[in-house]
Image (cartoon, rainbow, N blue to C red):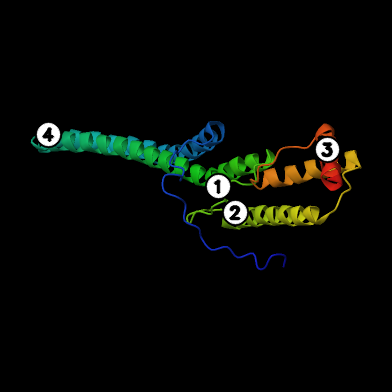
Amino acid sequence: MLYGRRVIEPQRVPHGQGSKRYILNKAFQYKYCWYMITAVAGGALLFFLPTFYFVSQNYELFKTLAYDTQPHLVQHLEREITWLRVFLAAAFVLITSVTLFLSMRMTKNLLSPLVTMEKHMHHLMLGQWNIPDYHIPAEDDFRDLSMTYDYFYRSLKANTETELRLLEKLSIDPQNREAYAAWKNLLAIKRSRLGIKEEFITNESVVELSEFDQKRRVS
């Protein structure tokens, strides 16, 4: 395989650069969190509402029997039904809160590597090839995709370095101003991608360079 096996060891993300935000894409995360909460809360309500209804009916029956036989038990029954209502309400709120938290965390883990790739790719689109390499977090859920992207980026960078070395070996006659200017500009573009600063060469500067070279040879 080109440039060896595509096996990349986990890289340590520099301290402070890891994404700690849970909201990376509001539209995507809110939509799927709403789906999850609706599904889980709806299922919980389908269980809690009938349970609360039948338990309340049974307690009303028990209270009626207690009034007729053991009036001192009515206070205990009322306390139990109150605690049952509190428990059901707290359980519903807890289930909804946990579902919201897990949904936000899950969608964040799904989006985090994609957002990082998008930012890294945006720099590459601008020709900024001298940026730091793409780091693969140890907890990345898209390790295969991240490794493929990292391999793709490294391959393109290696190809650019190879093209630059081949271009530097070319010998262009300075008298051919257009070809010489195009060659120098292409070298400058390749070097700027790799972080090597170089000014672009224009036709006028080519003429000046050729005249200076001729004067130097005559002298």
Mark earlier in primary sequence (4, 3): 4
Q: Which residue in the rendered view is the most extreme toward the front?
A: 219
Q: Position of residue 14 (x, y in %)?
A: 45, 50
Q: Earlier in the sequence, mark 1 or mark 2?
A: 1
7 vs 174, nearest the viewer: 174
Check the picture and name the quadrant holding the C terminus.
top right
Of the numbered discs 1 and 3, the one sitting upstream in the chain is: 1
Q: In the structure shown, which secondary structural element does the residue marked by tag 4 occupy?
A: helix
Among numbered discs 4 and 1, the one appearing first in the sequence: 4
N-terminal of the pair, mark 2 or mark 4, is: 4
Q: CA distance from mark 2 to mark 4?
A: 63 Å
Q: Nearer the viewer, mark 3 or mark 2?
A: 3
Looking at the image, residue 89 lies above or below residue 133: above
* Residue 75, label in figure: 4
Q: Nearer the viewer, mark 4 or mark 3?
A: 3
Residue 136 seen anywhere in this rendered image of the structure: yes
Mark 2 in CB contact with mark 4 (< 8 angstroms): no
Residue contact at pointers 4 and 3, CB within 8 angstroms: no
Q: Mark 1 or mark 3, which is nearer to you?
A: 3
| Residue type (three-letter) at the residue carrying disc 1 | Pro
Q: Residue at x 46, y 37 (%)?
A: 42
Whole-number angstrom distance, CA of label 4 to CA of label 1: 58 Å
Q: Residue furthest left?
A: 72
Q: Which residue is mark 3?
A: 206
Which residue is identified by label 2?
146
Q: Position of residue 39 (x, y in %)?
A: 49, 39
Residue 61 visible in the displayed image: no
* Numbered tag placed on residue 113 in the rendering: 1
Q: Are marks 1 and 2 in contact (CB under 8 Å)?
A: yes
